[in-house]
Amino acid sequence: MKKKSYFFIIIIILIMKTINFLKIISNKNKIKIIAHFYKCFCKKFCVQKLEKKLNISQSLNSKVITSLYNEKILSYEKNGRKKYYFINKEFKKQWGNIIELILSKKDLKDYKCQCKK
């Protein structure tokens, strides 16, 4: 009987993770930022540059970045007073195939990284 309950718990956890992922990608601003970071040549980006690149207000950008960090989609390194964000390796490993499909949509191609190599 214990094996069945463990299996049920695992299924519930997977469903919850999938629902959370679907909520994230349904938000246009979150997907814009994920699209940029997922393919970013620079690998790390400070928030101020991201605001200009994606044409997002400072307050909205900050809110979305904080949310993506809390959801373990983004990570950051601190250099002095600035934080440089990048896509979390575990997120990329777990959801990479689905993100690739999403980013292949024509309307999201504009948000892919255009940093110089």
Image (cartoon, helix red, strand yellow):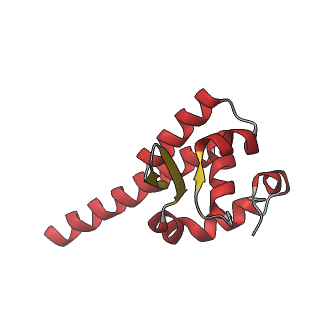
Q: Does residue 54 appear to the left or right of 89 in the view shown?
A: right
Question: Which residue is farthest front?
Answer: 80
Question: Which residue is farthest right?
Answer: 106
Between 73 and 54, the one lying in front of the other is 54
Q: Position of residue 33 (x, y in %)?
A: 64, 48
Residue shown at the point (67%, 45%) measured from the top left: 50
Above or below, 101 against 54 in this view is below
All told, the count of numbered labels is 0
Residue shown at the point (41%, 45%) measured from the top left: 70
Q: Position of residue 87 (x, y in %)?
A: 54, 60
Between 115 and 54, the one lying in front of the other is 115
Q: Is residue 27 visible?
A: no
Question: Which residue is farthest left?
Answer: 2
Q: Position of residue 5 (x, y in %)?
A: 21, 63
Residue shown at the point (63%, 58%) measured from the top left: 37
Q: Does residue 91 appear to the left or right of 54 in the view shown?
A: left
Above or below, 58 against 23 in this view is above
Q: Is residue 95 visible?
A: yes
Q: Which quarter shows the C terminus? A: bottom right
Q: Which quarter shows the N terminus? A: bottom left
Which of the 4 quarters of the picture holds residue 3?
bottom left
Q: Position of residue 67 (x, y in %)?
A: 48, 40
Residue shown at the point (83%, 51%) measured from the top left: 107
Between 80 and 70, the one lying in front of the other is 80
